[in-house]
Image: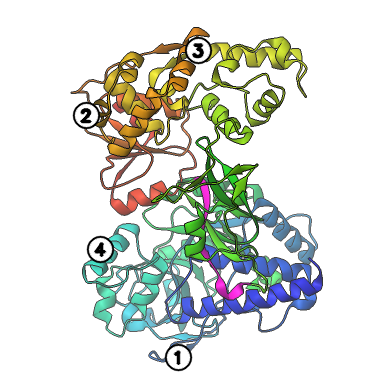
Amino acid sequence: MNIEEAKRRVALLRKEIDRHRYLYHVKDMPEISDEALDSLKHELQELEDKFPSLITLDSPTQRIGGKALEKFAKVTHSAPMLSLTDAFSKEEMQAWEARAEKIINAENIVGGYFAELKMDGLAISLIYHGGLLKQAATRGDGKVGEDVTANIKTIDAVPLRLDASSKYYHHASHGDFEVRGEVYIDKKTLDSINLAQKKAGLPEFANPRNVAAGSIRQLDPQVTASRKLKFVVYELITNLGQTTHKQEHKIAHSLGFPIINQNKYCPKLQDVVNFHKYWGKKKGSLPYQIDGIVALVDGEKLREKLGVVGKAPRGMIAYKFAPEQATTIIKDIKLQVGRTGTLTPVAIFKPVLLAGSTVSKATLHNQDEIDRKDIRIGDTVIIQKAGDVIPEVVEVLNKMRPKGAKKWQMPRYYEGVKVVRKEGQVAYKVHDRSLPSVKLRQLHHFVSISGFDVEGLGPKILEQLLSKGLVRDYTDIFTLKVEDLRPLERFADKSAQNIIASINKSKTIELGRFLNALGIPMVGEETAFDLAEHFGSLDAVLSASFDDNNKVYGIGDKVAKSITDYFADTDNRHIIDELIASGVSITNPEKASKNGPLKGKTFVFTGGLETITRGEAEDKVRGLGGSTSSSVSKETDYVVAGSDPGSKIDRAHKLDVKIITEEAFLKMT
């Protein structure tokens, strides 16, 4: 990007950020998520870092907050309530440390760091005089906030009088004493408030910060009191002799203020990174929401020496978790074909960090969805992870649409084959099962973990096998020999032998996985296992009528017809016969006990399991009379949380579904 392109992009970003900051901080009426706004600000910061000549005094990166509301008396802060620079990666944290070391002319930060959980709440300044609470004020624009003393007094966590038993009380009770902290609300209380809002026909709060801000800005303190807000201290402004930030927390706690017990002193930056990684995994277990950590140079004098750049202190930084929402620019829209010939438009965009990984494409689902959201090539969009895995476009930021943004339409032909759409359906398809791209998707599904689980046989190798004519259908996989693979690109004797060994090992397969591997239209993994459990053998599945299939739990008319039609097709029956003739052995499922210990219980798994695979865990549940699901609902009984759990944890908290560890699950089974 040259400077002229950057100038245009910076102008768009500033205008959009300013609009959303005003809606968020002044009106408490956000239109987009915190993560999406952070992503816009992060892009602007990167462009200004790259092109310093574009920095202006009115840039959002040089600002602190919104204007003070007129309905409260204005309060001028004794020292500015600064905002923090954001970091999203270890590399950005290392760059922050390097800048600090350069300023103080030292090879390392003497005294280490202090790491704190970053609450999703509202920053508040508290001033005590003579040991009694004198004034409470919001951040406002950083210099001038709002006097919300009456409302803050309704929060039990805020002491009205400092603890006289503290050895610091004498010093703190002479003149003014100021602390700063965060007003927040826990997850369960937020859920209760939103339930009441919904019953009253009122809009629900989008996040805890909105509840805290809206509650503190109520004219009637009784409304604030009803919200059951909480408070924690994160900083002392008055000097009581502290030399480190760690001491600030100790002093505040002794004076009667709540602090976050999980906060931690970190000797090295790597310890900060480890702290961030740990809570990135464990944040779902906390009763409140956090969006990252705050890292500070622990030494008071050293942090003071580092000073302020723009409107942010150099000695501290917000190390945020990978956002679950982000913004990016759509560069192109391409088609992806599925194993049944369904065509799915996919957005190709500028790579962006999202929920722990860098993504560069997202599903657009279908033409109707593109039209409904008015998605065009060149648009700036908000993306998020759906179901913990698949990125999707949530919203277009229309005010940032460039001139010449291109509309996209489904083509009439795909790889020379006519594209059709049946009446009453949203999906466009190519009805040619021999199309190479369709065949590749079918074969990849067939050998995937949820199917025959042939280790090492990925899409690139399958594509070579197809192009060389070595594989045309499922059965051909089981007739491959080492000498067939050896001439292929990047193959040697050992790798060829390993794949053939993996193919032979996969020939014995459980009925549910076999049915899933076949790729029956409208039949996913859970339905395949339901069929296997209901009928108990392949012969019974093959001889089942439409009425028989319709009696299977969770299967309706459309799916029952799809299953019946699939097994009535002579080509499909021939493929099954050939698979068995090639040595495939199908084992029947063990009948689940109708009165097993997990009867009637539904489990959802999220994150990585350490001692067993996801498939083995689900088999355990089914074998003991329970059922599994891929999504959390009111019908879910348990969510089993492994490492790096996704948004299912938050959903479980919201619905008050019990969350258990892998160890607890294994004890149940």
Q: Amino acid at mark 3?
A: Glu
Spatial distance from mark 3 to mark 2, Cα to Cα?
38 Å
Disc 3 versus disc 2: nearer the observer: 3
Furthest-left residue in this view: 595
- Quarter occupied by residue 552: top left
User: Would you say residue 95 sits in the magenta stretch?
Assistant: no
**Rendered residue at 65%/78% (across/down):** 62
| Residue picked out by circle 4 | 195
- What residue did someone put label 1 on? 74
Q: Amino acid at mark 1?
A: Lys
Question: Upstream in the sequence, badge 3 or badge 2?
Answer: 3
Q: Residue 578 bears which disc, if any?
A: 3
Q: Give the secondary structure at mark 1.
A: strand
Q: Considering depth in this image, is 52 or 202 the residue closer to the camera?
A: 202
What is the x, y in percent for residue 538? 36, 16
Q: Specify the segment rendered in magenta.
A: 389-401
